[in-house]
Amino acid sequence: MAVPLLEEGTATLAAPSPWLRRALTVLVALYDHAGLKSAADEQAPVNLHTYLDRPERWPGRCYPRTIHAPTESRTVLDNPTWRTGRLFPAPGEVDAQKVALTLEHVRIGDRGAHPRLHLPDDTAPTRTKIYVGYLGKHLTNSKT
């Protein structure tokens, strides 16, 4: 897993312990999901959302699917500024321009600054890595 880009204010988020615990749980589940994909098992879930939807079916650790969003809202997708705010550095194997649009995200917190973890799921059959594009305060949308 790649090192996340930590937003400057991340260390000052309110109540760090609960969201840090949840972030660690999510990172461990992402690691397990990538490991399952790398086993080249034909039964492996096609994407992270499927992996979380039926945790009893797969070995490994999970987090609640209710905190996972496979994409952004139509409002964010249709707003060029907000959409651009979800572009983060990525390795060349993810994107030739070394920038990834990270619409898939996890709700790390549900109060205060609403921390989020944004990621491009790069677990295609030939590539089995999950990169964290962003971990920090909730990015701009119609509710922030």
Image (tube, rainbow, N blue to C red):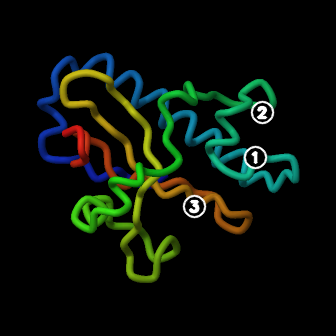
Compare marks 1 and 2 and give the one earlier in the sequence.
1
Q: Label 1, label 2: how many angstroms apart (C-alpha)?
A: 8 Å
Q: Position of residue 53 (x, y in %)?
A: 68, 33
**Callout 3: 10 Å neighbours few (<14), some, many (20+)?**
some
Task: Determine which quarter of the picture holds residue 13.
Answer: top left
**Callout 1: 10 Å neighbours few (<14), some, many (20+)?**
some
Q: Is residue 135 above or below residue 61?
A: below
Q: Is residue 30 above or below residue 59?
A: below
User: What residue type is disc 1 on?
Assistant: Pro
Residue designated by label 3: 122
Quadrant assignment for the C terminus: top left
Q: Position of residue 67 (x, y in %)?
A: 47, 30
Q: Residue at x 85, y 51 (%)?
A: 41
User: What residue type is disc 3 on?
Assistant: Asp
Residue closest to the eye, 114 or 94 = 114
Task: Determine which quarter of the picture holds residue 12.
Answer: top left
| Cβ atoms under marks 1 and 2 closer than 8 Å | yes
Residue designated by label 1: 45
Q: Residue at x 57, y 34 (%)?
A: 29
Compare marks 1 and 3 and give the one earlier in the sequence.
1
> Element under label 2?
loop
Compare marks 3 and 2 and give the one earlier in the sequence.
2
Q: Residue at x 23, y 38 (%)?
A: 143
Q: Is residue 62 above or below residue 69?
A: above
> Element under label 1?
loop
Q: Label 1, label 3: how many angstroms apart (C-alpha)?
A: 13 Å
